[in-house]
Amino acid sequence: MGENHWTTEITKIEPNKIVVRGYRIDQLMGKYSFPQVIYLILKGELPDERTGKIIDAILVSSVDHGATPPSTLAARTIASTGSPLNAALAGGILAIYKYHGGAIENAMRQFKEIVEGGKDVRQWVEEKLKNKQIIYGFGHRYHKNDPRTARLFQMAEELGFAGEYVRAAREVASAIEEIKGKRLPVNVDGAIAAILCELEFPPELGNAFFIMARTPGLIAHIYEEQTRMKPMRKIDPVDHEYVGPPEKDLT
């Protein structure tokens, strides 16, 4: 071992063998879902099926949100210049931060502050509003009743993940409405944050779930830009129209 020797707990690679957190990749294939393996590689242990289902729901919930988000516009703009997919994807991901897709980490920190600090929710909300501080994970510029939030919380109830953090998120929404006289419901970022707290993920990994979820959507937009649009076009963030397949009801 040299003076620059270092260690990792994540992977071990040998000839004809790939081991992740102690499990062989080829033995995981076909037995565990991608969301379950995400949990494994991030937390170091295999989750049960219900944990895999709630992570899967989190990832599906944020796979795309139209052509207007900053990350999508950034990715399409870069793709329009003739840059390769990886460059456009990197640009889109770099646009994800505090005000776009980046609220999950901050919402997790706030829910932990309330739950682990034993805070009175109404007093906590009053103090935040009095000091003009952002309460992350509430309200949405498009949705008054975000269907993704409703579904995530429904699944959290069904799968046994609706604990004290989910309760705190709902109580914060109620307190905001009582104090401000204005309804700011839990948005999808807030719902994801509460559930990730229930799963005992650290806040530092919160935004990673949005990035993992949104990557396929960004790739789809990049590919469409490269194959259907003229290079170097002026991309209007508002003046666009959906011309894809008609809506299908899966209920």
Image (spheres, helix red, strand yellow):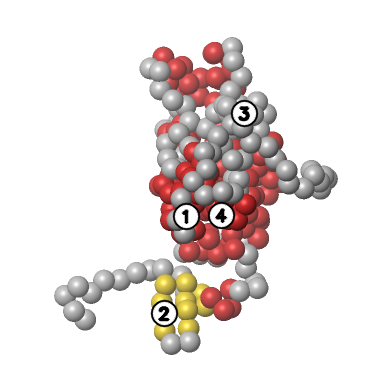
Nearest to viewer (mark 2 / mark 1): 1
Q: Amino acid at mark 2?
A: Ile
Between marks 1 and 4, how big is the CA–CA gap? 8 Å
- Residue on which the image places disc 4: 226
Disc number at residue 13? 2
* N-term mark: 1 or 4: 1
Whether residue 175 is situated above or below residue 87 in the rendered picture: above
Residue 135, image x and y in percent?
47, 27
Between marks 2 and 3, how big is the CA–CA gap? 47 Å
Label 4 with label 2: CB-CB less than 8 Å? no
Nearest to viewer (mark 4 / mark 3): 4
Label 2 with label 3: CB-CB less than 8 Å? no
Dot 1 falls on a residue whose secondary structure is loop
- Residue on which the image places disc 1: 82
- Residue on which the image places disc 3: 142
Dot 3 falls on a residue whose secondary structure is loop
Which residue corresponds to the image point at 80% horizontal and 44% vertical from the top-left?
246
User: Is residue 35 rendered to the left or right of residue 250?
Assistant: left
